[in-house]
Amino acid sequence: MTLHLFEGYGIELEYPIVDRETLAIRPICDALLREVAGGGTWVNEVECGPLRWSNELALHVVELKTNGPAADLSGLPAVFAAGIAQVDERLAKHGAMLLPTAMHPTMLPEEGVLWPHDGRPIYATYDRVFGTRGHGWVNLQSCHVNLPFSGDEEFGRLHAAVRAVLPLLSALAASSPVVEGRLGDSLDMRLEVYRGNQRRIPSIIGDVVPEPVWTRADYEREVLAPMYRDIAPLDPDGELQDEWLNSRGAIARFDRDAIEIRVLDTQERPTADLAIAALVAEVVRALVEERFVPLADLQALATAPLAALFVAAVREGELTRVDHEPLLHALGWTAGATTAGELWASLVERLWPAGDARVPRRFRDAIGTILRKGPLSRRIRDRLGAEPSRARIDDVYHELAACLVEDRAFNGR
């Protein structure tokens, strides 16, 4: 069934499986999925009511995703919280649990094990071409938001709107401040390392911010064809020549008529993930509906300044200076240069006004925590201090694991 703009939402949340005591990664996703499926053969995915549980590249990562598009986002926090509780109950039998945030804080990339079952040729090809024993491959967890479209006119509007919002998303969602037991230089270390994943074939990721193309034919010619061409000598069997090879921050999935936003870090609780997804979708909708500027103004936004702002937000989060006038204009901001945090606060005030009954209180509270105290990375850094010990890191991440199962906010200091 074809969905039009904002008639459905697909959400995917990824989590590492870790030891309940030591937080060491536990590569047992295959055992978990086979157990849920009733034993027997290995499986890549199982249906669990309104969710599906599935594998990822690394054997210690499991993904929970909506079992088809959801009509709206308001009921999904409870759905994902219930799914997480089910996973936790099963993993507890193995002395394991899920850990939130977008990077495991202490694992070494060489500890990662690739998925060994169905789909193995794809993962093996990735490993041969790119060398996947790196943090940007086996140590990253994200929230993917899929927004549908029907036909070129809707695709062009949606793609233009997503391009405008994408550079600012780390200011809301950064949750990965620690790598190998040390505070990183960037607030969003997942995206810092992710940007370098495809350095061997740059056309696969481009500038992370997608190119300004507005039709399927142009997208296939300007985005997909170059990366298929460039990887062909290293992938003679064509294992990787599919839409999902595209590693931009938002990618067109014509196989399901959706744009998939991929640069949101996983949060400490599903309510926060869904609140961020709902706010991002509302801003995208406002842009699609031309509430601030005509579509032509959105489509005129050049990639280079958006890409520069994306990198700045990855490093500085909500404190990032935003002074690119065309983007500020496109987002309805007229007061000159500002910070990414102030810009998000303004968008919330304009699009989610106080008293608007359409906005669930849980979403408003979750976004309020982010606007007041900073994205999760900022709150984690505040709690850890400047030079945290391994014991301190373990204590904080054990608390984050409790936040996930209890669906409660991590408030930092």
Image (tube, rainbow, N blue to C red):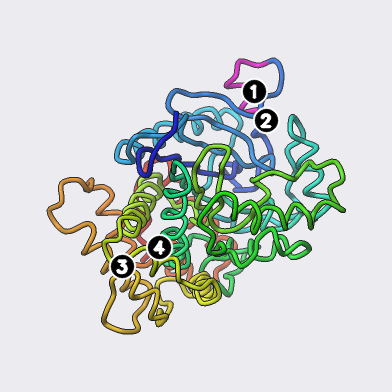
> What is the distance, in whole Å, between disc 4 and disc 3 at their CAs?
23 Å
> What is the distance, in whole Å, between disc 2 and disc 3 at their CAs?
48 Å
| Residue 30: image tag | 2
Mark 1 surroundings within 10 Å by alpha-carbon count, few (fewer than 14), some (14 through 19), many (20 or more): some
- 183 to 233, vertically: above or below: below
Asked if the residue at tag 2 contacts the one at tag 1, i.e. Cβ–Cβ closer than 8 Å, the answer is yes
> What is the distance, in whole Å, between disc 2 and disc 4 at their CAs?
32 Å
Query: Residue 42: where, in percent of width, then height?
Result: 70, 23
Which residue lies under the disc numbered 3? 293
Foreground: disc 2 or disc 4: 4
> What is the distance, in whole Å, between disc 3 and disc 1 at their CAs?
51 Å
Mark 2 or mark 4, earlier in chain: 2
The amino acid type of the residue labelled 3 equals Val
The amino acid type of the residue labelled 2 equals Asp
- Most extreme residue toward the left is 355
- The residue nearer to you, when weighing 368 against 9, is 9
Q: What residue appears at the point 42 percent right and 27 percent down from the top-left corner?
A: 50
- 292 to 145, vertically: above or below: below
Q: What residue appears at the point 46 percent right and 47 percent down from the top-left corner?
A: 145
